[in-house]
Amino acid sequence: MKKIQDDIISYREMCDIENVQTLQRGMNFRMNQKYSVILMSQRSNAPYIDKVHADGLTIEYEGHDVSRITNEPAYNPKQYDQSEKLPSGKLTQNGFFIKAVKEFKKSMANPELVKIYEKVFPGVWSLKGYFDLIDYRNVRDEKRNVFRFILKLSNRQENYDSKVAKIEHTRLIPSEVKREVWKRDDGKCVICGDTKNLHFDHDLPFSKGGTSLSTKNVRLLCMRHNLQKSDKII
Ligand SMILES: [Zn+2]
């Protein structure tokens, strides 16, 4: 049994795991019968959209901008409020996720299960984990309204992926930390220098007082060294 959260995968591997040719959109409601998929990709000069809350288990994800509605070269979707519906009245991806939150809050449904992948660098992706979609907010962000979806690390993930070992509720490693660690460790296992099957490893488990919030206790390990380490701890 292999822990896949925080594994480093290529874009192609991510598409293969999800059984699709391409993954273009950030928000993919009910990509299959079991879960939705969200891709996180931080713009380099933006504040952290995938803000990890202080509990280390909850993240905020910013909704989708409106699609291009004119061909004007100066058209900028960031000038427009994010929308729940298309002009036709059909739900946007924001709308589908909001509907799921409302049904969950009325106890009509379980929280939507959302699998989140994050782009660490171009071509370097990492599975952040499976999350329960528990809430959303419509907030004023500078000059426009945006949605922020609240997702909490789920403990239902083992039911949906037979390859995933039972995961102790580890806290999330912020993307910024992952980027710094990737650069510092030069995209290689810190023990053997392997560049394949890499994993972001917590040097000290949370249960033993480790925290993910610093680059000091996160490192890159290949699968072999990650598994060896796990054996010693258990
Ligand atoms: Zn190694």
Image: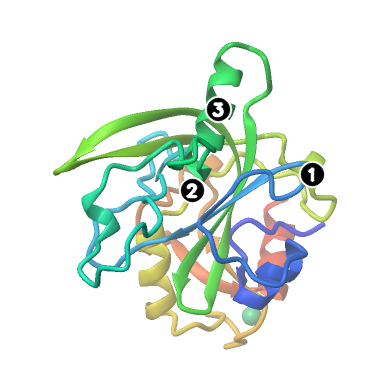
Rendered position, 152 above or below 218: above
Q: As rendered, which of 127 and 189 lies closer to the eye?
A: 127
In what quadrant does ligand 1 lie?
bottom right
Q: Residue furthest left?
A: 142
Instruction: From the image, state whether disc 1 or disc 3 is nearer to you.
Output: 3
Secondary element under disc 1, as helix, strand or loop, is: helix
The amino acid sitting under disc 1 is Tyr
State the separation of the CA atoms marked 1 and 3: 22 Å
Q: Where is residue 129 shown, x and y percent of the image? A: 60, 49
Whether residue 11 can be seen here: yes
| Residue under numbered circle 3 | 99
Mark 2 sits on what residue?
172
Horizontal and vertical percent for residue 176? 35, 62
Q: Is residue 222 left or right of residue 39?
A: right
Location of the N terminus (image quadrant): bottom right
Mark 1, residue position: 160
Q: Residue at x 62, y 27 (%)?
A: 111
Q: CA distance from mark 3 to mark 2?
A: 26 Å
Between discs 2 and 1, the one toward the N terminus = 1
Measuring 70% from the left and 43% from the top, which residue is drawn there? 35
Whether label 3 lies within 8 Å of ligand 1 gets the answer: no
